[in-house]
Image (tube, rainbow, N blue to C red):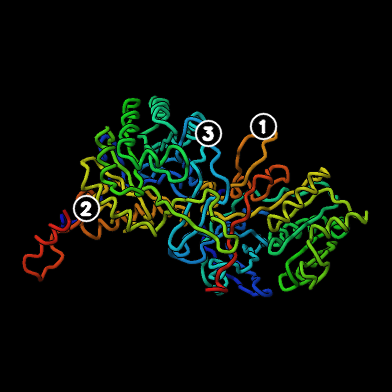
Amino acid sequence: MEKHSGTTNRAPDLAVQLGPLRLKNPVMSASGTFGYGKEYASFLDLRRLGAVVVKGISLEPRAGNPPPRIVETPGGMMNAIGLENVGVEKFLSIKLPFLRELGVPVIVNIFGNTVDQYAEISARLDGAPGIAALEINVSCPNVKEGGMVFGTDPAMTEAVVRAVRGATSLPIITKLTPNVTSISETAKAAEGAGSDIISCINTLAAMAVDVFSRRPRLANVYGGLSGPAVKPVALRCVFEVCRAVKCPVIGIGGITSATDALEFLLVGARAVQVGTANFTNPAVMVEMIEGISRFLEVEGMGDLNSFIGSLDTSCLFPFAEDSCALVQSEMS
Amino acid sequence: MDKIIEEARIVYQERVLGQTFRLGLHSPEIVSAARPGQFVMVRVREGMDPLLRRPFSFSRIYPERGDFEILYRVVGRGSLLLSRLAPGEGLNLVGPLGNGFELPGKESAPLAFIAGGIGIAPLLELIARITSERGKKGAEGLRLFYGARCADELLPEDALRMPGLRVHFSTDDGSSGYKGRITRMFEEVLAEGEFRPCGIYSCGPLAMQHSVAKWALSTDTLAQLSMESLMACGIGACLGCALPASTPEDPGAERFVHVCEDGPIFLAGSIKWKNIPAQQTAPPTWPFN
């Protein structure tokens, strides 16, 4: 681990480079938990965020699923919102201008029912000023068509990413689902098709029932699990994906504090997205940015990049003879 | 004023009766902007367990002291943890949230307040506000119809003593007041012909709200219903607290309103009642575990 012993009074540099996308710090909102940004404007200064990732947008407006849409679980929550959104035209005319005027980088999460729809919405957003990147949602577990069906099949993921790549010159992030046998395979497929960045994970497919009414507790029956409960799964996925692809990775899943965020950066994520934690503490992302900065100061690091991916897997048993070789063979 | 995050201080915590508690909170910034019918999201304790805040409406607002009160029933883990907090402790709030009640315009128009169970909470501040504005004379014609499952869940009469307010009680089991649903009592009182409200304010279980809405729509009476829902954010971001909305210009359209942002107060006609799925909120499981 690199450490700068001669600490200066300058604040640590939190800027990160994700392929074509440069962010002033690694903390951004996760799609679907932050509305279109404005909902949180009275709780934190949005301009301090690395980026704002907005609610998933489709070509046409969507009403979403009937209620109940959410269930709390120990250390987490399930949702089955069903991608309710205003549609791309209203997004551009009503929602985007607010964020554009603030000057915060806006990442637009997009989804469609067909490969063509993914291409069409990307083309529509391509010319719009004020968009820093597109995030392709091929991982929503809560809609019947579209969403996760594309993300659970590497060939379909590849087709979607290729179509989006052909329709826009904006940086592309592909958001992956953990509901697969091998997330690295999907990640490789997305990278191969031209995705600049990978983000993972989306929610884990889940379910809750009520023994009194003997009914599912979500009208959609299935929902997506998020929150601290999924963090260890997410961390494993992010670590796997970081080792499988060359492109930068954004870590998502149960991040609620600066140290949570640092864990994802440690295993190789170049940035993080914060989702469910925004509900518990609407100002959490700014506290997180400050926490990361303090951590770097305490650890004597001037630049966050020297911490990213610096996980030490070389020697878990310092007193054993020749343990390092054994550990490394297990990791690969 | 904008919604804010405020660290409130608990002023008092009292068990009113049974599982019903009153919690007094000193929260000057939120109180300075709070209106009847609005709510706060309460982080019942620090850390991430429970993960989500709990929504509670203002049951009393005391702007001069910077205090407000929430009246709540212990129904699950969140409210149980809340009930264990003591005066002097801090409590993290987000608020004030939601639209709040539209106060009645006409000085002496007769009004009905209909409350089911803990649904009395937001109506207490509303009634207090209206009775104090109208003064002793104009307060005639204010009636509260207040029902609960049993006498143990009804607030005592002296908690409801406000100038000019007449209270009708009902319980499902007949242990206090009229035996039967409060909405049936309401219709029976109206059938006597002495009282005909120009406006209704109601809060209670979904079935009660539906019954109030049906009556209001059939008689063309303005009804403001305080609706409840599970919520994750309370600020219009997660879209978790959806209710099917009626779209008069396009009755077939599928559209949802959100209790936190578009409500919690809705006009009877703005909700598409027939599209509300069966209630799936589990009763507390703790008696079995």
> CA gap, disc 2 to disc 1?
56 Å
Q: Residue furthest right?
A: B193
Compare marks 2 and 3 and give the one earlier in the sequence: 3
* Residue A174, percent from left and from top: 33, 39
Q: Which residue is mark 1?
A: B250
Please tell me whether mark 2 sits on a helix, a strand or a loop.
loop
* Residue A207, percent from left and from top: 47, 55
The disc labelled 2 sits on which kind of residue?
Phe
Please tell me whether mark 1 sits on a helix, a strand or a loop.
loop
Chain letter of mark 1 equals B
Instruction: Kindly indicate the quadrant of the structure image that contains residue B252.
Output: top right
Q: On residue A61, which mark appears? A: 3
Instruction: Kindly indicate the quadrant of the structure image that contains residue A120.
Output: top left
Viewer-proximal residue among A127 and A58: A58
* Residue B244, percent from left and from top: 63, 44
Please rate how many residues cluster around mark 2, counting C-alpha atoms within 10 Å: few if below 14, some from 14 to 19, many from 20. many
Left/right placement of residue B166 relative to residue B90 reads right
On screen, residue B285 above or below A47: below
